[in-house]
């Protein structure tokens, strides 16, 4: 009960994002370091694209996004025979960077996909149901979007699309013409 109250309290007074131009790969690497020794039996595959454009993110808040997604993926694979977790980054266009977190877990039903980001909704028997609501809140603050797809043959894929910092906007902030 205390954990539920603490999570709700955090969601209701979540600090405003303080985005700065940063390297998404660095945030992802730092986030994955938190799981060293904690992903027993799970094969982690990290494929972080080189030369990604910078993104405007609050590094601490976005680290929480990655940690929540990886934690949920690990939980979804608890009873799976094959436990593989993919974390990847790539530039999908000149002005968009994408983060993928995919697992070979139990998957998410079509009905549940619609509710995943609602506060207190959970497909697990434990937890508060606030993790993905917090993820959604943080992404909204950053102008980012998330989508959920099935991972074939089994599991779930979460795609996070983040606006890249384009050269023109960086130059404008610096007062330089491009």
Image (spheres, helix red, strand yellow):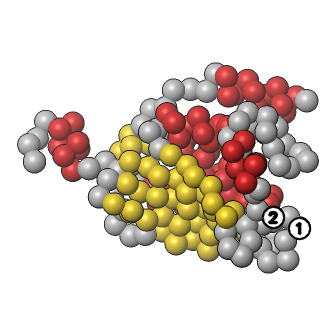
Mark 1 or mark 2: name the one nearer the start of the chain: 1
Name the element at disc 1: loop
State which mark lies toward you, 1 or 2: 2
Question: Disc 1 to disc 2, how far (Cα)?
Answer: 8 Å
Quadrant of the rendered structure where residue 60 is?
Answer: top right
Depth order, front residue of 162/43: 162
Residue closer to the observer: 114 or 164: 114
Residue denoted by label 1:
79
Name above or below for residue 100 compared with residue 165: below
Q: Is residue 54 visible?
A: no
Residue 159 locus on image (x, y percent): 55, 57
* Quadrant (top left/top right/bottom left/bottom right) for the N terminus: top right
Q: Is residue 49 left or right of residue 129?
A: left
Q: Residues within 10 Å of mark 1 (few under 14, many from 20)?
A: few
Image position, residue 112 (x, y; %): 76, 48
Q: Nearer the viewer, residue 119 or 36?
A: 119
SS for dot 2: loop
- Report whether 169 appears left or right of 55: left
- Is 86 above or below relative to 133? below
Q: Position of residue 144 (x, y in %)?
A: 47, 44
> Does residue 149 show up?
yes
Q: Are marks 1 and 2 in contact (CB under 8 Å)?
A: yes
In-image side of 87 versus 120 (left or right):
left
Question: Looking at the image, which residue is at 43% across and 65% down?
Answer: 90
Classed neighbour count for the residue bearing mark 2: other residues with Cα under 10 Å, few (<14), some (14–19), many (≥20): some
**Disc 2 target residue:** 106
The structure residue drawn at horizontal position 33% and vertical position 60%, both measured from the top left corner, is: 93
* Image quadrant assignment for residue 117: top right
């Amino acid at each position: 009960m205390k954990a539920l109250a603490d999570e709700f309290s955090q969601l209701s007074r979540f600090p405003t994002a303080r985005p700065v131009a940063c390297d998404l790969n660095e945030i992802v690497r730092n986030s994955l370091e938190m799981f060293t020794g904690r992903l027993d039996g799970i094969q982690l595959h990290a494929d972080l694209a080189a030369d990604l454009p910078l993104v405007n993110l609050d590094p601490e808040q976005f680290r929480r996004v990655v940690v929540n997604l990886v934690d949920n993926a690990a939980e979804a694979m608890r009873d799976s025979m094959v436990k593989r977790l993919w974390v990847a980054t790539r530039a999908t266009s000149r002005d968009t960077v994408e983060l993928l977190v995919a697992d070979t877990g139990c998957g998410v039903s079509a009905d549940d996909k619609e509710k995943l980001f609602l506060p207190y909704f959970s497909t697990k028997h434990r937890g508060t149901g606030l993790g993905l609501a917090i993820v959604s809140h943080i992404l909204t603050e950053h102008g980012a979007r998330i989508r959920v797809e099935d991972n074939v043959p089994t599991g779930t894929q979460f795609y996070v699309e983040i606006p890249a910092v384009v050269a023109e906007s960086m130059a404008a902030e610096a007062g330089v013409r491009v």
